């Protein structure tokens, strides 16, 4: 881009072209604002290019490979099968490229100025770009996301990977150590274990320790069946070459080490000191319920303003922030942010299923669901939490397609739905979504396909 080719002024400048940034740009353009979007790497950010989409693409391939190998129970007999890791990687890259092209087309169609580079605040109304341009803005949105947290002594390098590099391998490693048993670590472990790697997880607490214990126990059992060596309550101490010493006293050698211990907000070199933007003690940008920072001219969306660090939260916030900039009476007032782990089985949750006074929790096993039995996907359950007026407060799904059908639960909670509202809604038979109908029937003490007791 030629220096000086950009407009000197714009209604809205957005730093970061990930899912939060580009959705904010599109919505703002729809509302008639002039928009400049600055992205240092690729449109779509980490989600489209390095995280959400790539991991689910590769997990789908791994699931197909695993299911084909284990298809004998259905009467499908196959001979020797193998994985072409280079083709698998190319498919994953092609998917991301196609999606990035789609985002680029949308930005062009909405006449959004897209700049490849970085931006630094020089004041609360101006940015200096790495292209050499300086622009004045009326409002700005920070959507720079997050980056993998570095673990001291296990800094990223030649044989120590973050999740991005773990999803860019052109071969299946014989052995892999994953440091961290959160949702990212579990998904990567599931992926490579199904492809044939000997995977070890070292986790300071336990697998998915911040999830419901019934759910994490099922995932732990399945990972063990896949051959994953789970070391709970264990941390890495030191590394010599490819050999890692763990706090349980063991020394093991691994071809690949993946560090997955969390995410940190990305605020490097933004020049926030030249604005009135302030950070919380953990380095996240402080925002109010309209996503405005402590500088009235600057908003922040997505991971950079705190948790939960999920792409769909960033998308919603991007839309809200654009509407706020355009003067609409919008606010980020969503009651729930549904979350999912693409493990085996999947975990998805909306709201809270914590048992406490005044809250009733009902559990329906998938072993009583027709479609689950037909597809041999009975490993899982659904839980619903409701208050004394039968208002739904939370739903958790553990099982096949959990991430797909959890949105019904999120909508129910947002709408203040009751158990009766869901139970009396006809669900297509036979489907996994019926499990939500079944569990709410149980919550009303009128269970149909599972006996809860008299």
Image (cartoon, grey):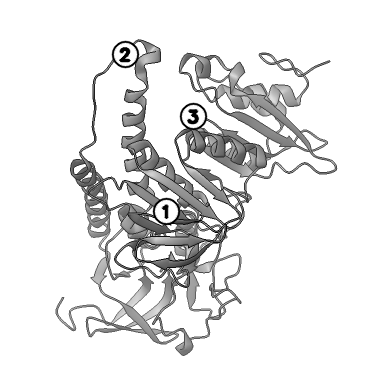
| Residue 30 visible, this orientation | no
N-terminal label among 2 and 3: 2
Location of mark 2 (residue): 76
Rendered location of residue 336, percent (x, y): 61, 49
How far apart marks 1 and 3 lie (CA) works out to 27 Å
User: What secondary structure is marked by label 2?
Assistant: loop
In the rendered image, residue 308, in percent from the top left (x then y), is placed at 55, 57
Residue 392 visible (yes or no): yes
Place of residue 93 in the rendered image (x, y in percent of width and height, measured from the top left): 23, 49
Q: Nearer the viewer, mark 1 or mark 3?
A: 1
Mark 3 Cα-neighbour bin, 10 Å: few <14, some 14–19, many ≥20? many
State the quadrant of the C terminus: top right
Label 1 sits on a secondary structure element that is strand
Q: Secondary structure at mark 3?
A: loop
Which residue has dot 3 on it? 400
Q: Which mark is residue 315?
A: none
Residue 317 in the image: above or below residue 418: below
Q: Residue furthest top?
A: 75
From the viewer's perspective, tell me whether residue 45 is left or right of residue 285. left
Check contact, mark 2 vs mark 3: CB within 8 A: no
Which comes sooner in the sequence, label 1 or label 3?
A: 1
The quarter in which the N terminus is drawn is: bottom left
The structure residue drawn at horizontal position 67% and vertical position 28%, both measured from the top left corner, is: 421
Q: Residue at x 45, y 37 (%)?
A: 227
Residue drawn at (18%, 41%), measured in percent from left and top? 87
Label tally: 3
Q: CA distance from mark 1 to mark 2?
A: 34 Å
Q: Residue at x 51, y 34 (%)?
A: 222
Among the 4 quarters of the image, the one containing residue 85: top left
Q: Which one is earlier in the sequence, the residue at label 1 or at label 2?
A: 2
Q: Is residue 68 above or below residue 113?
A: above
- Residue picked out by circle 1: 177
């Amino acid at each position: 881009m030629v220096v000086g080719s950009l407009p000197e002024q714009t209604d809205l400048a957005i730093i970061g072209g990930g899912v939060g940034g580009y959705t904010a740009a599109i919505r703002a353009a729809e509302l008639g604002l002039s928009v400049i979007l600055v992205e240092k790497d690729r449109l779509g950010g980490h989600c489209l290019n390095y995280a959400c989409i790539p991991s689910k693409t590769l997990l789908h391939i791994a699931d197909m490979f695993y299911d084909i190998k284990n298809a004998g129970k259905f009467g499908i007999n196959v001979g020797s099968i193998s994985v072409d890791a280079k083709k698998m990687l190319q498919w994953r890259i092609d998917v991301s490229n196609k999606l990035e092209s789609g985002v680029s087309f949308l930005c062009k169609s909405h006449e959004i100025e897209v700049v490849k580079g970085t931006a630094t605040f020089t004041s609360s109304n101006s940015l200096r770009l790495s292209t050499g341009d300086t622009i004045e803005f009326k409002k700005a949105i920070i959507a720079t996301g997050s980056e993998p947290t570095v673990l001291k002594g296990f800094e990223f390098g030649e044989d120590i990977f973050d999740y991005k590099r773990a999803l860019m391998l052109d071969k299946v490693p014989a052995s892999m150590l994953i440091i961290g048993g959160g949702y990212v670590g579990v998904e990567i472990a599931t992926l490579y274990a199904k492809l044939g790697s000997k995977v070890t997880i070292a986790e300071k607490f336990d697998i998915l320790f911040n999830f419901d214990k019934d759910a994490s126990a099922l995932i732990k059992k399945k990972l063990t069946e896949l051959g994953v060596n789970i070391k709970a309550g264990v941390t890495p101490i030191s590394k010599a070459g490819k050999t890692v010493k763990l706090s349980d006293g063991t020394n093991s050698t691994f071809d690949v080490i993946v560090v997955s211990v969390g995410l940190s907000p990305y605020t490097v070199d933004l020049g926030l000191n030249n604005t009135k933007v302030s950070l919380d003690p953990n380095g996240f940008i402080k925002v109010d319920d309209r996503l405005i920072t402590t500088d009235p001219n600057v908003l922040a969306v997505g991971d950079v303003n705190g948790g939960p660090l999920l792409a769909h939260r960033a998308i919603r916030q991007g839309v809200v922030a654009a509407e706020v900039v355009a003067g609409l009476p919008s606010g980020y007032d969503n009651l729930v942010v549904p979350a999912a782990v693409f493990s085996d089985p999947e975990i998805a949750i909306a709201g809270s299923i914590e048992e406490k006074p005044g809250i009733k929790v009902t559990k329906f096993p998938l072993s009583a669901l027709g479609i689950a039995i037909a597809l041999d996907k009975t490993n899982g359950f659904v839980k619903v939490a409701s208050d004394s007026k039968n208002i739904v407060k939370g739903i958790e799904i553990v099982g096949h397609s959990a991430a797909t059908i959890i949105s019904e639960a999120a909508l129910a909670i947002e709408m203040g739905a009751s158990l009766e509202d869901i139970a009396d809604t006809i669900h297509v038979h036979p489907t996994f979504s019926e499990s939500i109908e079944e569990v709410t029937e149980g919550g009303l003490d009128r269970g149909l396909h599972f006996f809860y007791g008299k």
